[in-house]
Image (cartoon, coloured by chain):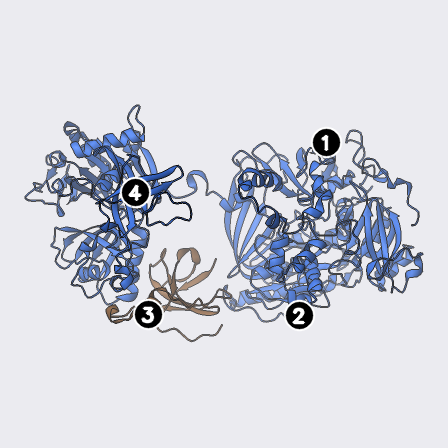
Chain colours: A brown, B blue
Amino acid sequence: MLIIDCPFCGKRPEIEFTYGGQAHLTRAAQPGAVDDQAWTDFLYMRTNTKGVYAERWRHSHGCGRFFNAVRDTTTDHFLATYRAGEPQPAVTP
Amino acid sequence: MSAVPDNRRNPTGGNALTGGETSANGNVATPGRTAIGGRIDRTQPLNFTFDGKAYTGYAGDTLASALLANGVHLVGRSFKYHRPRGILGAGVEEPNALVTVSRDEARTTSNLSATRVELYDGLVATSQNRWPSLAKDLGRMNDILGRFFPAGFYYKTFMWPQKAWKALYEPVIRQAAGLGEAPTLPDPDRYAQRYGHCDVLIVGAGPAGIAAALAAADRGVRVMLCDESAEFGGSLLGDPAATIDGLPAVEWVRASIAALAANPRVTLLPRTTAFGYFPHNFLGLQQRLTDHESEPAAHQPRERLWQVRADTVILATGAIERPLVFPGNDRPGIMLAGAAQTYLNRYGVKVGSRVVVVTASDAAYQVALELQAAGVTVAAIADVRSSPQGPLPEAARRAGLKLIDSATVLGTEGDLRVTRITLGQSAAAPGQSTAAPGQSTADGVHTLETIGCDAVLMSGGFTPSVHLFSQSRGKLTWSDALKSFIPGQSAENARSVGACRGVFGLAEVLADGAAAGAAGAGAAAAGSAAAGTAPPPTVTADASRRFSVEAPLRSVDGYLGALPAADAAPKDKSFVDWQNDVTTKDLALATREGFISIEHVKRYTTTGMATDQGKTSNLNAMAIVAQKLGVPIPKVGHTTFRMPYTPVSFGAFAGTSRGDLFDPLRTTPIHEWAAARGAVFENVGLWKRARYFPRAGEDMHAAVARECRAVRGSCGIFDASTLGKIEVVGADAAEFMNRLYINSWTGLGVGRSRYGILCRDDGFIYDDGVVGRLAPDRFHVTTTTGGAPRVLAMMEDYRQTEWPDLEVWLTSTTEQWAVIAVQGPKARSVLEPLVEGVDISAAAMPHMSIASGRICGVPLMLFRVSFSGELGFEVNVPADYGAAVWKAIHAAGQAHGMVEYGTEAMHVLRAEKGYIIVGQDTDGTVTPDDAGLSWAIGKTKADFVGKRSLDRASMKAPNRKQLVGLRTRGGQVLEEGAQVAAKPGQTPPMQLIGHVTSSYHSAVLGYPIALALVAGGRNMMGQTLYVPMPDGDIEVEVTSPVFYDPSGARING
């Protein structure tokens, strides 16, 4: 079980959290102006990275807040957690 | 051939020198027991039975040691060939000696390793995989027919004819498959679970683990030390010659453990296996609490599952001796040399009276010397190496033991126990003059001699136990010197110490453990090594602890793969994996058939896939595959190590999560009333919902028909409290709803409600429900019963991450309100006398309106809404008043013929009206238009979740599956999930155009009705389609999904 450092509550066990998929996917401000391919990519295409990966988590059984994390998918070590809306920090595994 | 002792032929398969298994009554002196020594308590004899026969052992014995003390080597039949099998090891590595231990019919555990079963008085054990008896087993035919059962046998054989699978192959295979039998009664034992937190967790309490624990504990940190055995000490318990700091090793263990036990910051966990290593230094430990007790106390849990989070993990998991691979290497009496040493020194058991040692390492020499000292005849030491040197071989020569170098084994004999071994020698061997050469075989090996014996002790060297290290995602590296994979870079804050990282000398092992314990404690004290962060720096030797040790120096040689000529001797099988009966031939076949990945070879041959997970076999298998492929072993690589290290009972994982405690239970305020009324409940998510209320003599069909007629004829009362309820509040509440739901909310007046549909951004229906506007800035959103949590989560996701600018708050109010649906033409008449301060007349309160006031004196939020198609209200009252208000309405309704109804009638009523249930009539690929709900879409909105996807061409295609009604021409009730075809009389593969989503018999209409999703269905009204079933097509007519009151006159009544 992972230990996840919620930016609002601190380190908590994984069972308090819900996974939210790849981070930094931006929903177009005007989806109607986006072509089919771009919309398809937004809906369905994910990087499935082996290595450093920015992803969303929600502290669903805690503060309820969504936040972002950078995790090394090969080791499951978290390299950073940060609030939604903040840019992805530069980290190395 | 050289002379063979007279005792080589023993009709019982036992051996005269040890007394064998045929002692008259089981009460004779145990023939294999030494006169003195061992860590057993000779003042405490214990009685036990094996296959119904009575034996005696001592406290401190395992079942294996007690059986060996009684001369019993034959303990099981092998999985595939049913060959007689004996005890190979003395611990977790044991592949053969699987037994069933029974306390009673419910407390029966199969596939326990006899080497790990602690003896208790009255223990009842039975062997497995034999019929009719262990000594006479019909399954043995498989061995004689063995050449017809190669690797991949199943894949190749049971192909044709297809029908034979169900009738013949599968039953026969199932009968033959599996080891042991599951108990037929529920497990009555209790299982506990606990979290543990510590600075340093040490796995394994051998010399390295104890030294690490002492060093860490000295530094004042919290230490947990676990060991799978009943007694701490590991290899030291079987090593009486060694001394540490001037004390005999076992005395040093006793003093060390006493010091640790006295430290309040140290937790000692004997009989505790660390079976799984999960990310961020989280380990699963299985602690066995009562399996060793004759009469466990009733209050005692049987096992405890520890979930331990450790700052630093020290793996001191030791090494496992490798067997040698040669023809006939699986007969009872052939075992690991180290196991024989453990039986002698720890349990006071001589595994034979005349043994032959076959070895590739020095360790077995010490075993031979100790056995000789105990009075066992060591007929020969056959060393695979060409010129064994060093103190131990020298000592063996001085002791007059017969040494053969460059040796190999050409075969063994003996049916139920080994009686003879035939040795060979490589032609190039320098010392071959010890015997006259016999006939030559392949590989330049010639036959040397055949020696009578009742035990063969083998040692192919030691394989470091890297299971947990590898589970933690640490990288393994290949060591040519050690002929093993050893831990490389750790992925976690973990350190491997001692034999599990290839450090074997006792002094070095102790120093290694102490250094890691000190470093681990130092890291914890500094707080620098938090779980889940980077791995530690390389361990440097800790100068603070030195151990003065006397122990025999020995090389770390070993042998990998099959011994020379093992392949060339066709007379018998050379086993690599004892438990799954995988031979050298199987591995060779796999490589010949093109399997080059070790993972594929493993799955094809099943090598390493038995309950022992290949602890003795994996490295030999890799070596054989590497040799066959002509590549170095590290190129072949290793298979993935997965948890659990040893089998863990389901009970430990389940803990208290069984029966009523398996899952949380959600009940409504009306639950007790419904239960007292005899309701039959169904599970909806975690909720218990009343499905129907049968009266005397009614089945479900009759009860549902009566309930439906009552709602349509007069009125019914229904518990809708499980509906999900979310309050959306704030200045931007309407904007939020506009962006999220497909509907437009701007024009919805206060006191009015609307049927809302929520799509995901992919355009497919996600949830639905009535949404009421309680105030300009306050919406009461209802969701499906099962969908409430995910709808709230989705709302929160968009609120927090997409539209953080909106001023809106979300609150779950599902459990704040009890919801009592009153439906039917008499609904208004029933409620009118009960409500205060609210006019519920048709004019004042039309369909889809909301009013508040009081009912029965308590606060009321009243929705005029209907999921039945009748005039209907949903009475919302604070949950605490739910039961009282329900009873009051129910009592008042009796004068109007009111009937309580359940979810089944509710389903029929809504299907008669063509109302969908999300998740039943939709499946995540259904758009609002597919479901006939495009009228709900807010046409003027620039955007809502899902809008962009609904604009894609494929989402508007005319041949999409659309919701329609189906009526069977023959009056049958269709099966939900049945497929729909356009053409009759098809055979598979059929062309199918849709499927049935809901189907009921409508008592009110007098015929069956169904809803279905059919491609282009809305353009097929009146057409005939076909529902293919096993006994033929059912003709159906495509109709509107609205079967009842299509004009909606009743709902507006």
Residue B765: x and y in percent read 28, 54
In the image, taking residue B1013 as reference, residue B626 lies left or right, namely right
Report if residue B714 is visible in the image.
Answer: no
Amino acid, disc 4: Ser
Residue B471: x and y in percent read 57, 59
Answer above or below: position of B542 versus B1001: below
Kindly report which numbered mark, 3 or 2, lies closer to the viewer in this rendering.
3
The residue pinned by badge 4 equals B998
Kindly report which numbered mark, 1 or 4, lies closer to the viewer in this rendering.
4
Residue at mark 3 shares a chain with residue at mark 4: no
Report if residue B91 is visible in the image.
Answer: yes
Label at residue B541 = 2
| Tag 1 near tag 4, CB within 8 Å | no
Residue B19: x and y in percent read 83, 36
Q: Tell me the subunit letter for badge 2.
A: B
Residue B1040: x and y in percent read 21, 45
Q: Tell me the subunit letter for badge 3.
A: A
The residue pinned by badge 1 equals B53
Amino acid, disc 3: Gln
**Dot 3, how many residues are within 10 Å of its Cα: few (below 14), some (14-19), or many (20+)?**
few
Mark 1 element type: strand
Residue shown at the point (26%, 52%) measured from the top left: B1016
Which quadrant would residue B847 be assigned to in this image? top left
| N-term-proximal mark, 1 vs 4 | 1
Gap between marks 3 and 2 measured at Cα: 60 Å
Work out whether residue B194 or residue B327 is closer to the camera in this orientation and state it.
B327
Mark 3 element type: helix
Q: Tell me the subunit letter for badge 4.
A: B
In the image, taking residue B225 as reference, residue B572 lies left or right, namely right
Which residue occupies the extreme top position in the image?
A: B697
Answer above or below: position of B832 versus B496: above
In the image, taking residue B722 as reference, residue B281 lies left or right, namely right
